[in-house]
Image: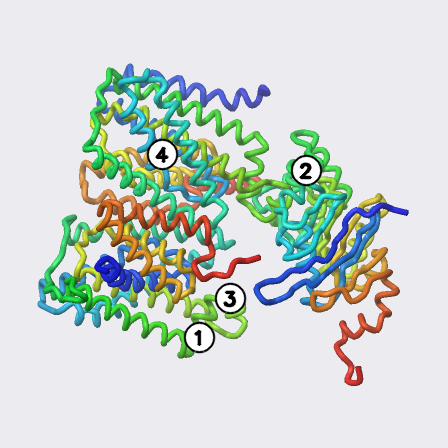
Amino acid sequence: MFILITGLLLGGTYALIALGLNLQYGVARIMNLANGELLVAGGFAAFWAYTAAQVSPVAALVLVAPIAFVLNWLIYRIMLQPLVSRAKSRGALEVDSILATFGMSFALVGIMTALFGGGYFNYAYLAQPVDIFGSSYGQNRLVAFVLAAIIGLGLWLWLSYTRAGLRLRALAVNPSSARLVGIDTRAASALAFGLGGAVTAVGGALISMFFTLDASVGILFTMKALIIVIMGGVGDIRGTIVAAMILGICETAVARLIDPGLTLAAAYVLFLGVLLFRPQGLFGKKPT
Amino acid sequence: MSRTVLQVQGVTKRFGGLVAVRDMSFDVTEHQVMGIIGPNGSGKSTMINMISGLFAPSEGSIRLNGADLAGLPAHKTARLGVGRTFQLVRLLPELSVVENVVAGAVFGHRRTWGRTAELHARQLLDRVGLGGAIGLPVSSLTYIDTKRVELARALAGDPAVLLLDEWLAGLNPTELATGIDLVRSLRDEGRTIILVEHVMDAIRSLCDRCVVMSSGAKIAQGTPAEVLSDPGVIRAYLGEDEDA
Amino acid sequence: MSGQEFLKALPWVALLIAAVFVPFVAGPYWLSMATTMAMFVVLATSWALFSGPTHYISLATAAFFGVGTFVTGLGFQTLPFWMLPLIAAGLGGILAALVGMVTLRLSGVYFVIFTLGLAELVRQVVTWVQNQTGQRGMYVLTSITERDIYWMLLGLAALVYLAGWLIGRSKLGFALRIIGNDETVARHVGIDTALAKVALFTIPGMAAAAVGAMLAPRYIYIEPSTAFAPLLSFQVVIMALLGGTGRLWGPLAGVIPFTLLWEFITRQAPNQTLLLLGVVFLLIVYVLPGGFVGLWARIRRRFHQGGGA
């Protein structure tokens, strides 16, 4: 039971991070390998707000989200759009965007190390335990989960019921048809990329409440988010959430029952299973 | 009586809930040109793609000289003797024109390598009328020349059956006449060809026999003259009459 | 080999012979530098043999390399040293084939992620096994000198170049060029694309594992976190791409300047190495697509056009 609940709580934040990546990959078609660094940056911002200005991480979200949105929007417009325009094929764009976002990832790690040093950082916010079903859990984990759920739900409602959301979904399904019905694909892609980045950064701020981060840990989160996206299916919100929960529970179980040093190995075994048996994602239709 | 080369029997293809091809059966006889015609979206391309191994049929069998192709990947159908061109021309941009054709001769049905393959490729390029454009980079070929190169690549493996997927589409009237002559000359040298086509002139003058598809099913079969005067076929092309 | 080809190969053979004599003229510092370069020449060239034509970006180098160092670490006391790189190469090839079979029929993104995590996966498992058995790291104390390592790597580099040259002239090489251009066409002309890719991917796997086995004595003490350091994979990618993958000599042209630059930065500003890595990545994408090979081709084209007009 303890494993299940801890896993679900962790999975909630994972889901948010993976949703951010999924928006970027599913709609803007850029596999953003600097995603984890933006997460860490979000965490840094929350850390800094809490320790330097005594602002609670929850309140800091109000600031983190728009800044991350603008930053990611600019990254797409300035750095990535030229690659999209010059790409001769989907494959060429894939290689270019992988290299470019890896470049950004390393550059961001370098910059963050220069700004904040290479050490670990964490802070105690709502660190008191609460009791559920006889076991105790950190309040901060609970708060992070609830916030992740609210933001995820908000995002889902926005995508499902607004015109802008409809545009993004159309673009995700079929870019060339989206263009035919008058959707400005560049603007919509930039919007999706910015939004995805904002969601990821918020996820980072939430995770920093209960998780010790350092400047170079981003790549680990990128990998986890990617595994979740691939497991859940590109562009599939429901799949992403389910996959995130599975990963959260699986990691917690391995850490508790076998060895905490094997969490990534556990994630990889899951990933391998998906690649072998359901490469189209948990809920994806198998092309026959 | 000529031999049957390709035999399609009871082939159905479903994409999710959508039936793209329903219970198709037809035979292709050696040295003949078989046309597959029908309105847009009637399943012609899906049918061709199942023969070449791009898709696996949901049901049914496709036999080429006795070997079942259904469900085999494309590289195996190619080795068994299926050669094809693509609806949207697909050349290899970083390779030279000659290498593009050699590509078809090395791994497929009949295989050669090295100097023999190159010589063979040059002969085929000559055969399809590319002539002087042979030394140009692929990116600066004219539209019909790209189609010629693709045809030569498909011929390079000496396929038992050649699939031409709208090979004549998009040509201007002069080019079209040249194209029709070229396909006819292939038939005259004894090739077995399946032609998916919209251009009526081409169908009339090239096809020995035709299969007409509508909404994924076969609605008529026979010589071009027979099927093109069939009321069912006319309805399928022009839409339902009010009194029909 | 025709006479013309022989003439073309001559400068390269001369370069190789010159490289053999480096240990006799270089001091310890430059010998160590030359060894590092030889190591990256093998890694980057074999990497480019696969990734150049297929456009798949492999980050599995560190995993293969780490496997190789562990082969030496576990076997150097019981087996003759010359066997170790061979065993490592065998294991690396098998591991590469397995990874290839799982991932190479999928899109490039899946491949990148999977190979990136592979080193981490192997590292975590090895660490765990060591914890279970109460081991920590391993001492590799041999009589092998830096010079020996350098010569072994040089020999391996010559082998890799030979393999690359042979593949370039073979049907496999031609098949891979077709695959890199259009995989659908490749399948339709009769190429078993999955098999071709897996076969080729075993080459960087074998080479990197052999390099790891040869270099293990240099480290003296091996532990999982250094043997499987993911940074190595990225260094290899960047050197290969900086040089360019279109030609066999491309990676070499990337290895030499980048190794010198890396050395300079690690000494002057050790905290900025990652920033450097990031900046060079971006530089390649935005300023130097195709690396030095691409640049060279553009210069030659301009020169020819200028001469012709």
Image mark for residue A174: 3
Q: Quadrant of residue B48?
A: bottom right
Residue C240 is left or right of residue C34, and the answer is right
Chain for numbered disc 2? B
Chain for numbered disc 1? A
Q: Callout 4, which amino acid?
A: Phe
Q: In the structure shown, which secondary structural element does the residue marked by tag 2 occupy?
A: helix
Q: Residues within 10 Å of mark 4 (few under 14, many from 20)?
A: many
Point out the residue furthest to the right here.
B1
Residue B128 in sight from this viewpoint: yes
Q: Callout 1, which amino acid?
A: Leu
Image mark for residue A166: 1
Q: Distance of mark 3 from mark 1, alpha carbons? A: 12 Å
User: What residue is drawn where x is 57% and y is 64%?
Assistant: B16
User: What residue is drawn where x is 13% and y is 62%?
Assistant: A48
Chain for numbered disc 3? A
* Camera-side mark, 4 or 1: 4
Q: Quadrant of residue B171?
A: bottom right
Q: Distance of mark 3 from mark 2, alpha carbons? A: 36 Å
Q: Are marks 4 and 2 in contact (CB under 8 Å)?
A: no
Looking at the picture, does residue A109 appear above or below residue B234?
above
> Residue tagged by mark 4?
C64
Question: Quick one: quadrant of the C terminus of chain A?
Answer: bottom right
Q: In the structure shown, which secondary structural element does the residue marked by tag 4 occupy?
A: helix
User: What residue is drawn where x is 30% and y is 66%?
Assistant: A199
> Residue tagged by mark 2?
B105
